[in-house]
Amino acid sequence: MRVFIAIKMDHDFDSYVNNLMCKSGSVVLESYHITLRFLDDIPDEQVEVIKNSLNKVKFDRFAIELGRIGFFPNDKFPRVVWIGLKNDSKMIELKRKIDDILNLELETNFKPHITVARLKQGNVNTYENLEVEPKKMIVSSFCLINSVLTREGAIHEIVEEYYLE
C-alpha cells in the first residue's frame, strides 16, 4: 500500500481553496490535505503495525490559519504551488509526535503546506497576485491515507482516521 499521514481539510477550507484556484484558472481538486509524512509503499502487515502505533498519538485539537502562496522549489523554477500556514508550531509538534511514535527520523526541513497545483511550465504570474484570506480551521483529526496512482492522478482513500482530544 502506498500510504501517507495527513490532515484533511474541512468542507469550508476545501471550498475556499477551490474557489481561489478557480480564480487562477487551475484544475481544482476534490479535497485538499496537509501531508505530515509520506511513508511510500508499505506491506499490508506493516500498515497494521502503523495503524496500531498511530492510535497511541495523544494530542489536543488546535487551530490553523492560511498564510501566503509559495512555490517549490522556488518562484524562479516553480513545479508546485502551495499555500502555507501562518502559525505552524502545533502542526510541527504533532508531526514530531507522530514521527517519534513511528520511530522515524526527524525531518528538519518540514514546512506544513497545502499543495494546490502542480506546474508543467513554470509560470507563477497566475498565482502571485492571488489574495489568500486568513481562513481558520480547527484540526480535530489526522488520517492514514492510501494513495492509488492512476492515469488521471492519485486517488486518496482514508485507511484510518485518528481523532485529537
Image (cartoon, grey):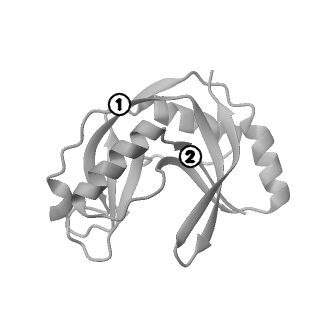
Please name whichever residue, 74 or 32, is drawn nearer the observer in this view of the structure. 32
Q: Whole-percent x and y of residue 15? A: 39, 44
Q: Which mark is residue 6?
A: 2
On the picture, is 114 further left or further right than 130? Answer: right
Circle on res. 87: 1
Residue 127 sits in quarter: bottom left
- Location of residue 146 with respect to 131 vertically, above or below: below
Image: 134 above or below 165: below
- Residue 153 appears in view: yes
Above or below, 73 against 66 in this view is below
Query: Who's the residue at 57% across and 21% down the image?
Result: 60
Q: Secondary structure at mark 1?
A: loop
Task: Please report the residue visible at 24 percent of the width from the left and 70 percent of the height from the top.
Answer: 77
Question: In front of the other: label 2 or label 1?
Answer: 2
Sequence order check, earlier mark of 2 and 1 = 2
Figure quadrant of the C terminus = top right
Q: Is residue 88 above or below residue 123?
A: above
Q: Position of residue 44 (x, y in %)?
A: 82, 60
Number of disc labels? 2
Q: Amino acid at mark 1?
A: Asn
Residue at x 54%, y 23% (from the top left corner)? 61
